[in-house]
Image: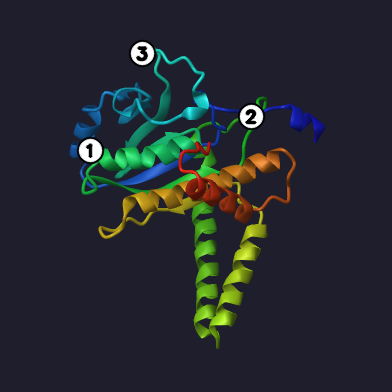
Amino acid sequence: MFDRLQKPFLTVETGEAYQPVRLAYTLHDPNQFVQTLENLKCIQRNSMPNSWNWFWQAECNDLPFESVSAFQRTPDRPIRLGTITQREGKVFLSLTSFKRACLAVPFFHKIWDQKVVCIHQADFVNKVFSLSERLPHGFTELFKEEELDRILHQRLEDYSKVEEQCELAPTVEEAFGILSDYAEAEAKKRLPYVERYLFEIREEDDSEVVFLSFYVYLRARELVAIKRWFSQVGFEASESTDATLTQVFGDMGVDLF
């Protein structure tokens, strides 16, 4: 425990904890997608087919990475924020921190026509890594489709059962009790190593609310990972969610990362 308290966890160039995230988009019009992508100055093709790098420059130059305010940025060496890959009718944006994911989703939502490409899900890792730890070799090794689907469907199935119990409850008080017990039990569960978050953005939805919900969800997971790194093993997801909501709505000027 003492050794861990003395050793920092791995961070990325912009100052946040290294926590891989893969955003997956549904692709409807490949040609229009590529045309829009290559019109961006913050995007550059890389050596792999159907693959591009996303840099912190030009159109996204003002993305707020306050945690790296002391970093000396130079135009000739922009930071690579992520990698975009097109394959099998989908687009994947691979990133190395939760903050980058939370900034990427609204940034590209404004740029990409939703009839061309739209956000579908985010896969992420619920832990931070030590400086000497072996890192996963590529995102394919990290995110196993069967495991992610199993975890997601189990969560949806559990919630569906609780929802049914609430509907059959004889009183509102009992229904709230069932929901409260479920929330408390979920908060005490050990978070899975990898997890999947599904986006649902309908035409009538406020996209900013959808993205804020994603931010709160990821921020809560990040806090749990960091607290447990510092041996606070009893720290629960509900505590981190409460802390995040307090910071977001209590002082909107605070950089939460």
Q: How crowded is mark 1: few (under 14 residues within 10 Å), some or many (20 or more)?
A: some
Farthest residue, direction bottom: 170
**Helix, strand or loop at mark 3:** loop
Pick the quarter of the image with the N terminus: top right
Q: Distance between the residues labelled 3 and 1?
A: 27 Å
Rendered image: mark on residue 75: 3
Q: Is residue 164 above or below residue 76?
A: below
Q: Kindly check if marks 2 and 3 are in contact, taking CB atoms under 8 A apart as contact.
A: no
Local SS, label 2: loop
- Give the residue type at disc 2: Arg
Left or right of 212 in this view: 128: right
Determine contact: label 3, label 1, CB under 8 Å. Answer: no
Q: Tell me the residue that label 2 is attached to.
A: 134
Q: Residue 173 carries which label?
A: none
The mark nearer the N terminus, 2 or 3, is 3
Residue at the image point whose x is 44% and y is 46% from the top: 122
Q: Quadrant of residue 9?
A: top right
65 and 122: which one is in front? Answer: 65
Residue 211 image offset from top left, x and y in percent:
39, 48
Q: In this view, does 67 lie to the left or right of 240?
A: left
Judge depth for marks 2 and 3 and give the one in front. Answer: 3
Q: Earlier along the polypeptide chain: callout 2 or callout 1?
A: 1
Residue 100 in the image, given as x and y percentages of width and height: 44, 35
Looking at the image, is mark 3 or mark 1 nearer the viewer?
A: 3
Residue 144 visible? The answer is: no
Q: Which amino acid does label 1 sit on?
A: Phe
Task: Tell me the crowding category of disc 3: few under 14, some 14 to 19, or many 20 or more residues within 10 angstroms, Cα based.
Answer: few
Q: Does residue 52 appear to the left or right of 100 in the view shown? A: left
Q: Whole-Å distance between the Cαs marked 2 and 1?
A: 35 Å
**Residue that carries the numbered disc 1 in the rendered image:** 33
Residue drawn where x is 69% and y is 38% of the image: 229
Measured as percent of width and height from the top left, residue 121 is found at: 41, 49
